[in-house]
Amino acid sequence: MPYSTHPTPLLEREHWRDLGGSWRFAFDDAAQWSHPEEVVFDREIVVPYPPESPRSGIHDQDFHRVVWYGRTVVLDAHERVGRLLLHFGAVDYRARVWVNGELVAEHEGGHTPFTAEVTRQAAFSPTLEVVVRAEDDPHDLTQPRGKQDWQREPHSIWYPRTTGIWQPVWLEPVPETYLERLTWTSDMQRWQIGVRAVLQGELGPDLTLRVRLWRGNELLIDDRYAVTHLHMARQLSLADPGIDDFRNELLWSPGHPQLLGACVELWRGEVLLDRVHSYAALRSVGVSGNRFLLNGRPYYLRMVLDQGYWPEGLLAATDEELRRDVELARQLGFNGARKHQKIENPRWLYWCDVLGLLVWEEMPSPYRFTPEAVGRLTHEWLEVLERDMSHPCIVAWVPFNESWGVPDLPNNPAHRDYVRALYHLTKTLDPSRPVIGNDGWEHTATDLLTIHDYADDPEMLRRRYGTCEATHQTLEHQQPADRPITLGHLPEAGLPVILSEFGGIAYIPGRQTGWGYSQSQSETAFLSDYSLLLSVIHACEGLSGFCYTQLADTFQEKNGLLYEDRRPKADLRTLARSTQGPRTAREMAVDPLSNPFGHSARWRQRQDTLAPHRAAQEAEA
């Protein structure tokens, strides 16, 4: 059962209102309108589904550069006290927002959130007339766009476009002085949880911040601090249980996703001003020599490529669909997902935190190298890091993929400097996680050596990565995708090597059309081909993990383990056995409770980590 329904579960208030549902809508292909008064709304759309999707009610996949949305919101009593915030999860690509005829927000970047304060508009009217203009040039390849196609019909590895609102829109009343943002960090060496709070409003006297952490019903931390600045940072020291058996109970991992329920309150004297519910986790990730580390111990990555598209909603999904993808990845035996060319809805990250799935977060690419493209990607990437840094499931940041947007890395120093700059900027803002500067090949700055290799002969993969010596030779002398794996100046023998794209076996029954990197002709052959390929990968001593392509069929690309509607192509348990391979004592030591089928029920029997203390808090207030 869901423990939170809030669009941003890391900053959850009791009172908020989902504005999803029917909105007025209009195409503006000639970009002829510049103000809400000029717009002629001639149809309805279901928000937050893009107009290209069937679920939106529009289902128009033609080129539309500008679209308009409108909705009348009748305010309730809660929304007319204090301040009122209007939140947008993501609008692709450039948004302008008017409320009651006044421009209240402008934002560029199709994958990151923004907020407009509409307190003044709410003070003078019992209703809000919300109008949104979204501009998304389908042919502009300097925009970070990921897998969104610039051609009329999806081709090769690109898929239908997404225009306009595609993540939740909601209203949230807050007090005059309130908690705007929380960031959680973890320090396993010192057995500490770090919290950074950003406040908005006037400070004044007698202002304090109260922070509480729970493990189930057990109160771990109850601290209170005088607020002297709008930015507050504290380290919360936990009692170290000492022995590993007890330490493991407190640590987060895919097999044991222990979250610590959090409540942060802002008080003025004895008056409660603001309260937000959140959560944190104690865990560490890192690299030691040629091994990836989770909680200080070697951990073998079994990941799956996840494109994050659905046939009815395209990039947008229901909360049930987001959760189901996490559950299916686990049931297929994977302990992680590489979310490919997409910054996913925070609800998906929430389910990865709650259910236990590691995540590599990857920035959607532009496809040209220009000063404008550099500025756009860098600005949006900084917003991504700010939004998602607190999620314990994220274990690697990936600014670039396969040299997209930096096509001349081997020959152009500016392209190499750009990748290095984003690598070091990311490490500066978050030194706690590995960063992969450019996933797949042409590495110039990275903490993991990742390789994309779609060789369809398993024995060729064994020859390339079967031993550490063979892997070293591959790194130095071979180009699996006709690209050099490194561009020099990297300690090839001293970094973990991850096969971060491989496989892509297509099974296309009936009259379907599509493609994969290889093809099986029956379900039995599909199971056999997958089992053989994964058995070879598990035997490759030169690898510290893998990422199989891919979780689900995606439009013309039919190489998923699941069909596009998420039905398995073969028996889940049989596929999971192949994915997991032989279990090792090392992995069991890090993840003692790991079991893709038994985990969910067992975990729920232990306790609801996030909820049991809330009723007591409400009664206390």
Image (cartoon, rainbow, N blue to C red):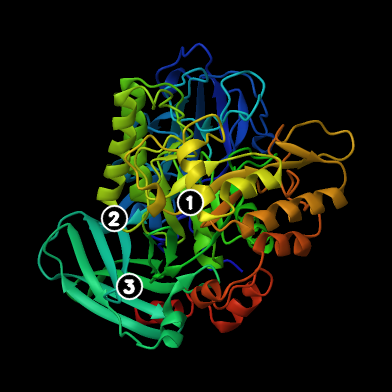
Which quarter of the image is occupied by the N terminus? bottom right
- For marks 2 and 1, the one nearer the N-term is 2
Q: Can you identify the residue that label 3 sits on?
A: 188
- The quadrant in which residue 454 appears is top right
Q: What secondary structure is marked by label 3?
A: loop
Q: What secondary structure is marked by label 2?
A: loop
Mark-to-mark CA distance, 1 and 3: 25 Å
At which x and y percent is residue 539? 63, 59
Residue drawn 44% across the image and 35% down it: 129
Please name whichever residue, 63 or 155, is drawn nearer the observer in this view of the structure. Answer: 155
Q: Can you identify the residue that label 2 sits on?
A: 431
Residue 535 visible within the image: yes
The three-letter code of the residue at mark 2 reads: Pro
Tell me: 201 left or right of 418: left
Q: Can you identify the residue that label 1 sits on?
A: 497
Q: Residues within 10 Å of mark 1 (few under 14, many from 20)?
A: many
Q: Residues within 10 Å of mark 2 (few under 14, many from 20)?
A: few
Task: Note whether 543 is above or below 124 in the view shown.
Answer: below
- For marks 3 and 2, the one nearer the N-term is 3
Please name whichever residue, 295 or 183, is drawn nearer the observer in this view of the structure. Answer: 295
- For marks 1 and 3, the one nearer the N-term is 3
The three-letter code of the residue at mark 1 reads: Val
User: Mark 1 or 3, which is nearer the eye?
Assistant: 1
Residue drawn 32% across the image and 76% down it: 212
